[in-house]
Amino acid sequence: MNNDGITAFMFTGAYRVPLPLLTSSPMTDIVLIHEVIGVGELAISDYRSSVPSFDELARIASDCRVASLLAKKSGTVHVHVGKGAPGLQPLWDLLEKTEVPITQFHPTHLAGRTQELLDDAKRWAKAGGFIDFTADDEEVDNTCLEALRQCRADGVPMSQVTLSSDAYGSFPYFDDDGQVISYGVGKPDTLLWSLKTLVTTQGWTMEEALNLITKNVATVYQLGRKGQIQVGFDGDLVLLTPDFKIEYVFAKGKEVVVPGWVKKGMFEP
């Protein structure tokens, strides 16, 4: 929480194992540092990962599970899933051979990889796990919206599905030989565009679409008074115009964005 009233949380760790940490272990990071709610993005099935072993994943997941009980946080392991053949299998193996529950994991980037991975993601959600899709830019083929369509059509409980922007993450572009030729960057407005598209052209109700980026996210990360408009919850509100432009933003009941004005931070001119 900063002095301007915007609530922010973070993961400890990164793609690769051993994890870069703030203290001596994922457990102590989560227990001792208020803002740390889990580990992520830990990469599997991706050439950019360190190809973590079963034992390495099991130890991290177990640490996060114990930390979640001690700190009363989610202790979520947020998992980057690449295009590699194993897909979600490393996580299925953990469920089979350890006592860590399926809700301890939140795999992401499950759209736009392969149909096999998307099908396995649907199976994961039906088994009680949470899954995350990365919102696409309106200028690209929207594999995210297609994945959401398939989930609804195939009876996936949509309360288990979240949508994220991957804002300011790097997006590499490859040539036909698999060589990186340039980098793009994730945009934060992909969530708003996806919300607008789901409601205006895909037949979703506003509540159904909003849950993907509000209520469901708060459920995954056990954020308590976040994600819903309820008595006793934090007054975090975004007011949109009829054409889905942001007009007002309230954080814990205080104005931080109004037409023509944005609240500055303590050290901003």
Image: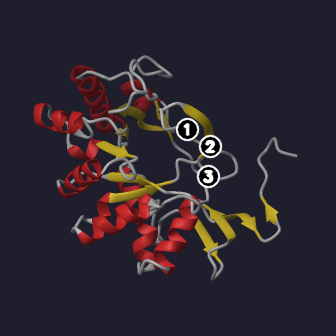
The amino acid type found where label 2 is placed reads Gly
Q: Which mark is residue 187?
A: 3
Q: Residue at x 47, y 30 (%)?
A: 12
* In contact (CB < 8 Å): disc 2 and disc 3: no
Residue lying at the far right in this picture: please name it.
269
On residue 172, the disc is: 1
Can residue 1 be seen in this snapshot?
yes
Q: Nearer the viewer, residue 85 or 132?
A: 85
Residue 136 % position (x, y)? 51, 57
Q: How far, Cα to Cα, is label 2 from label 3?
A: 9 Å
Residue 235 visible in rendering: no
The tag earlier along the polypeptide, 3 or 1, is: 1
Look at label 1 and name its amino acid: Pro
Q: Position of residue 140 (x, y in %)?
A: 54, 58
Q: Are marks 2 and 1 in contact (CB under 8 Å)?
A: yes
* Structure colour scheme: secondary structure
Q: Is residue 186 above or below residue 256?
A: above
Residue 141 on image: x %, y %? 49, 60
| Front of the two marks 3 and 1 | 1
Determine the image quadrant of residue 266: top right
Q: Quick one: label 1, few (<14), some, or many (20+) residues within 10 Å?
A: few
Query: How many angstroms separate mark 2 from mark 1 (CA)?
Result: 6 Å
The image quadrant that residue 126 belongs to is bottom left
**Crowd around label 3: few <14 · some 14–19 · many ≥20 (10 Å):** some
148 and 62: which one is in front?
148
Label number found at residue 184: 2
Secondary structure category for the residue under label 2: strand
Q: Residue at x 47, y 67 (%)?
A: 232
- At label 3, the amino acid type is Lys
